[in-house]
Amino acid sequence: MPIIADTHVHIYPEYDVALLLECACRNLDQTARQNGLPSSGNMQRVLFLTESSGCDWFAAAGQGRLPTGWTAKAAPLPLCLTLGHERSGLVHCVPGRQMATKERLEILGLAMREVVPDGLSVHETLDKVQQAGGVPVLPWALGKWLFSRSRIVRDLVLSSPPDRFLIGDSAMRPSFSPWPSLMRLARTRGFGLVPGSDPLPLPGEERRAGGYALFSTTAFDPERPGAFLRGVAQDASARILGPRLGLVSVLRKTLALRTDAKHRPFPSTPLNVKKNYDR
């Protein structure tokens, strides 16, 4: 069965998780329809989570603390929760982490439960993700692939084998912009590319989940979600679907992150699971 997946989904403590799940299912379906693909009943939806330090919604969900109306079935590992809702249908949620490195880059660790600390070097972080059985991703980010840090990204791409990590594209990359030169370089060297919505720690951002996604006809096994990702570079059916944000929207959101102390950053405390949850 074909798959449509958002590979960069944050769940922050102040998010309305019920809204995020509902919007993610709707956005994935809409993206599929707009590209002439099968309806949700003939396609598996997948959200690869990238939770930051102090956030662990997946653990809370695995303990049964789910939004009202949602149920969960865990894979044996468990590296996947299959969530179901009467109206929204099914969506697979795969755990993962986002780490900030010493070089002020970001690394994602997809399909893994282990927490990797922030502040390690980029190479140490990649090693830790692989040791945890996760799939490392070097995601594009505004500012982090420019100026002095661009040299670090370039050296990393040139010195690493293509199976060392994937390259992440983001809906935050302005829609008018061509492929960044470093992303083109990575592609010519054989690195796989995975897209994601990358919602920010700002009010209402949970509505964007599922809006920028990867389509593939490769089988997705909830018991081995990482295997799907590791095959992306050789997947001839893989396509990036969905719109990215416009420049004005990107600049507004970036400015809000820099100036609104209320939302930058969230405190490193356990996830608040009181809101919109069954007890």
Image: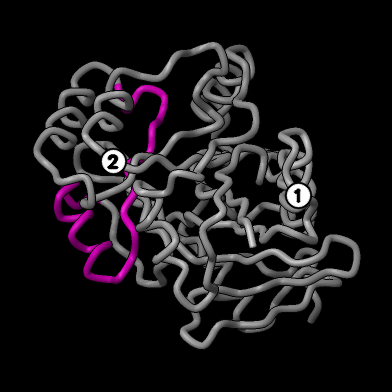
Q: Which residues are magenta?
A: 119-145
Q: Is residue 212 visible?
A: yes
For the residues bearing labels 1 and 2, Cβ distance under 8 angstroms: no
Tell me the residue at 50%/44% (across/down): 238
Callout 1, which amino acid?
Answer: Pro
* Gap in angstroms between the C-alphas marked 1 and 2: 28 Å
Tell me the residue at 50%/63% (across/down): 269
Does residue 206 sit above or below 86 in this rendering? above
Question: Which residue has dot 1 on it?
Answer: 38
* Residue 143, magenta (yes or no): yes
Q: Residues within 10 Å of mark 2 (few under 14, many from 20)?
A: many
* Residue 25 % position (x, y): 75, 53
Callout 2: SS: loop
Quarter of the image for residue 101 reads top left
* Residue 239 % position (x, y): 53, 38
Seen from this angle, which residue lies furthest bottom? 76
Quarter of the image for residue 21 reads bottom right
Callout 1: SS: loop
Question: Which residue has dot 2 on it?
Answer: 191
Callout 2, which amino acid?
Answer: Phe
Mark 1 or 2, nearer chain start: 1
Q: Nearer the viewer, residue 40 or 104?
A: 40
Seen from this angle, which residue lies furthest front? 236
